[in-house]
Image (cartoon, rainbow, N blue to C red):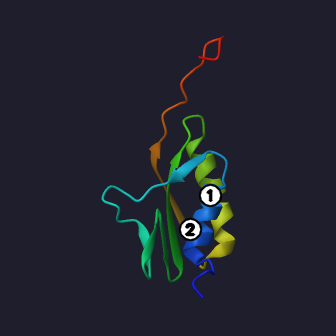
Amino acid sequence: MGDEPTAADLVASAARSVPGVRDLHGGAMGEVATYLPGRRVAGVRVQDHRCSVHVVIDWEAGIAETAERVRAAVRPLVDGPVDVTVEDIADPAPAQDATGA
């Protein structure tokens, strides 16, 4: 008991697996979360008939395309619409010179 992933866990995993998603984001004050016994899943709010997913995307990722891929990955896991909010865009990776430094 307690080892079974919840809908929020499945949504979080699906969203993180989307190319271009760096991580989930809990919102400005950490208010975006699903509260479970003894823990919370930040960046995902699963409610009756609606789901919200807040993400940080990679610098190179297209915003609309990445949000749509997140929506498509999550939709089969929940009832109702899936709202995707891009909370932040991660800094680009530093360029390396020819020596690999």
User: Which percent across, then down, holds residue 77?
Assistant: 65, 74
Query: Measured along the vertical axis of the image, is residue 48 above or below residue 89?
Result: below
Task: Residue type at mark 1: give it.
Answer: Val
Determine contact: label 1, label 2, CB under 8 Å.
yes
Task: Residue type at mark 2: give it.
Answer: Val
Kindly indicate the quadrant of the structure image that contains residue 81. bottom right
Quadrant showing the C terminus: top right
Q: Secondary structure at mark 2?
A: strand
Q: Is residue 29 visible?
A: yes
In this picture, residue 45 sits left or right of residue 18: left
Between disc 1 and disc 2, the foreground one is 1
User: Which percent across, then down, holds residue 92?
Assistant: 53, 31
| Residue identifier under label 1 | 70
Q: Name the residue rendered at 48%, 41% in the picture.
A: 89
User: Which percent across, then down, holds residue 100?
Assistant: 64, 17
Query: Measured along the vertical axis of the image, is residue 77 above or below residue 28?
Result: below
**Upstream in sequence: badge 1 or badge 2:** 1
Count of picture labels: 2
| Residue identifier under label 2 | 82
Kindly indicate the quadrant of the structure image that contains residue 10. bottom right
Q: Nearer the viewer, residue 90 or 76?
A: 90
Query: Measured along the vertical axis of the image, is residue 77 above or below residue 94?
Result: below
Q: Nearer the viewer, residue 57 or 84?
A: 57
Q: Secondary structure at mark 1?
A: helix
Specify few, some or many for label 1: CA neighbours under 10 Å numbering under 14, 14-19, or 20 or more: many
Quadrant showing the N terminus: bottom right
